Image (spheres, rainbow, N blue to C red):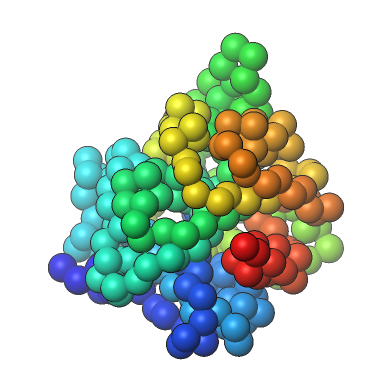
């Protein structure tokens, strides 16, 4: 199956501009990049796609066993870039997609030029001195809640993920995106996301890397962004004066400016 079809790939923006690939996280699809895409499109070639099991990806491509680890998502990313015959791509990954980017740039370093990690977390669960923000019990309760009441879970999580109480339209946007995901796919993707541990993979990143986190983010608190920065040699860390886990939704101007500045930097 063509990667374009499998992952609902769209390429928009400036045909000859620097290539920026935008990858969404758990519970999302490419529509949540809309505002950032509009800001970047005049000067950049933007590659948008949906992970298999999310958004408008091809349902026939879904396989629960295949997509239980991050590796299958990484393979899809590399397939898309190769099928589009792209080079020097700046990969922008949100949340769990940031770790997909960490793995993709090591799997196919010849395809990528830079790595931009938006609210990344290499591990959500606390472990010894490492503080991911959650205990194992917290994550087990979160997954159990998702299993028992899929739509209710999305409604209860929206204020935490988006954290924009004065913008209910943005919470609705995230919830609508989440509800476009098949519940069975979401349950697998949730475990892939919240039970993953990619801390050891950070040291293998050799590309210019920028980490952007939010000052008030319950899912990936600032200490997690600092950890990623400290474990990727030569990386840059920028903390936005923003709340929530989705600055590309709540602060698209700041997010787009950070991406554009990074892509243009030498």
- Residue 44 vs residue 148, the one in the foreground: 44
Residue 233, above or below 244: above
- The percent position of residue 152, horizontal first and vertical second, equals 56, 49
Label total for image: 0
- Residue 167 vs residue 254, the one in the foreground: 254
- The percent position of residue 17, horizontal first and vertical second, equals 51, 82
- The percent position of residue 43, horizontal first and vertical second, equals 60, 83
- Residue 114 vs residue 6, the one in the foreground: 114
Residue 222, above or below 28: above
Q: Residue at x 83, y 63 (%)?
A: 166
- Horizontal arrangement in the rendering, residue 191 relative to residue 41 (left or right): left
Q: Residue at x 64, y 14 (%)?
A: 129
Tell me the quarter of the image containing the C terminus: bottom right
Q: Residue at x 80, y 45 (%)?
A: 215
- The percent position of residue 104, horizontal first and vertical second, equals 37, 49
- Horizontal arrangement in the rendering, residue 260 relative to residue 76 (left or right): right
**Which residue is situated farthest in the top direction here?**
128
Q: Is residue 259 among the parts visible in the rendering?
A: no
- Horizontal arrangement in the rendering, residue 38 relative to residue 185 (left or right): right
Where, by quadrant of the figure, is residue 70 drawn?
top left
Q: Residue at x 73, y 37 (%)?
A: 222
Tell me the quarter of the image containing the N terminus: bottom left
Q: Is residue 227 among the parts visible in the rendering?
A: yes
Residue 187, above or below 176: above
- Residue 186 vs residue 3, the one in the foreground: 3
**Which residue is situated farthest in the left direction here?**
1
């Amino acid at each position: 199956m063509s990667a374009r079809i499998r992952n609902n790939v769209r390429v928009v923006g400036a045909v000859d501009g620097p290539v920026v690939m935008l990858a969404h996280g758990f519970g999302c699809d490419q529509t949540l990049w809309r505002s950032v895409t509009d800001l970047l499109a005049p000067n950049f070639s933007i590659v948008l796609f949906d992970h298999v099991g999310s958004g408008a990806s091809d349902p026939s491509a879904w396989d629960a066993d295949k997509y239980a680890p991050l590796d299958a998502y990484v393979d899809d990313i590399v397939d898309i870039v190769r099928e589009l015959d792209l080079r020097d791509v700046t990969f922008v990954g949100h949340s769990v997609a940031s770790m997909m980017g960490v793995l993709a740039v090591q799997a196919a370093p010849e395809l990528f030029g830079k790595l931009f990690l938006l609210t990344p977390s290499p591990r959500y669960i606390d472990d010894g001195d490492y503080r991911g923000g959650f205990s194992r019990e917290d994550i087990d309760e979160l997954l159990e809640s998702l299993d028992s009441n899929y739509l209710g879970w999305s409604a209860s999580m929206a204020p935490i993920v988006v954290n924009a109480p004065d913008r209910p339209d943005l919470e609705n946007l995230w919830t609508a995106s989440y509800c476009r995901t098949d519940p069975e796919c979401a349950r697998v993707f949730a475990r892939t996301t919240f039970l993953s541990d990619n801390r050891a993979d950070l040291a293998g990143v050799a590309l210019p890397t920028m980490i952007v986190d939010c000052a008030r983010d319950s899912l990936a608190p600032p200490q997690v962004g600092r950890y990623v920065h400290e474990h990727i040699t030569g990386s840059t860390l920028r903390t936005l004066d923003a709340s929530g886990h989705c600055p590309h939704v709540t602060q698209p101007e700041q997010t787009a400016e950070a991406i554009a500045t990074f892509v243009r930097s030498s």
